[in-house]
Amino acid sequence: MAKIFATIDEELTRWIARQKLFFVATAPLSDEGLINCSPKGGDSFRVLGGTEVAYQDFTGSGVETIAHLRENGRIVIMFCAFEGAPKILRLHGRGTVVTAADDGYAELIAKFPANPGTRAIIHVDVERIADSCGYAVPVYEFKAPRDILDQWAADKGAEGVQAYQRANNRRSIDGLPGLDADA
């Protein structure tokens, strides 16, 4: 059944690369704050080392993950096999938000395809790597990626995306700081 791994080895790296969808969960420190779980997709996830991963964070209507990471750093990333053998993989760790204004952004963003909707890279130092059976996860057939967000960002242009971020991504729904005002 469940197994704990010391590192993300080559076999896990290949398995992760085949997954079309992953989920990110974070929570604020406040008991009244809302826990957040976000689906992510596209060619946006990279294993950088045995206990280091990153993903491309796209502009969205909320900024919960960024706000929670800036407050406390706690994050879990979950992959589920929807095709092939059942499997769930969770990567627990400490995440940091890397924006275009931060040192190291150019090096990280170069690992991903260009995307006009990118607002940050989420970098995670993984502290626990664990799988579980996934026997109850249904089998789904992947048909195609959605390009709606990419097209939205391309239509808005860089200035339009930044204006959207300034208007919608400065604070989380709990009022925590999200993106800087000059995002």
Image: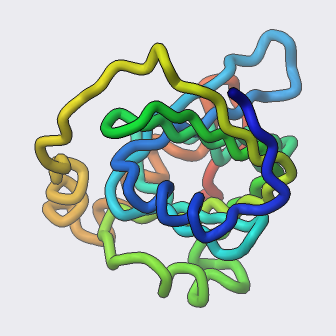
Between 68 and 169, the one nearer to me in the picture: 68
User: How was this image coloured?
Assistant: rainbow
In the image, residue 154 sits, relative to residue 33, either above or below, namely below
**Toward which corner of the image does residue 17 lie, by quadrant?**
bottom left
Q: Along the horizontal axis of the image, is 83 left or right of 61?
A: left
Residue under the image location 79 percent in, 28 percent down = 28
Name the quadrant of the N terminus.
top right
Between 89 and 86, the one nearer to me in the picture: 86
Query: Where's residue 68, x and y in %?
Result: 74, 39
Q: Along the horizontal axis of the image, is 75 left or right of 161?
A: right
In the image, residue 30 sits, relative to residue 90, either above or below, namely above
Residue under the image location 68 percent in, 66 percent down = 9
Query: Where's residue 66, x and y in %?
Result: 65, 47
**Toward which corner of the image does residue 123 lie, by quadrant?**
bottom right
Q: How many marks?
A: 0
Name the quadrant of the C terminus.
bottom right
Q: Along the horizontal axis of the image, is 127 left or right of 46?
A: right
Whether residue 182 is visible, yes or no, is no
Whether residue 51 is visible, yes or no, is yes
Query: Where's residue 101, x and y in %?
Result: 64, 78
Query: Where's residue 141, x and y in %?
Result: 18, 34
Q: Along the horizontal axis of the image, is 129 left or right of 78?
A: right
Between 1 and 105, the one nearer to me in the picture: 1
Residue under the image location 35 percent in, 63 percent down = 43
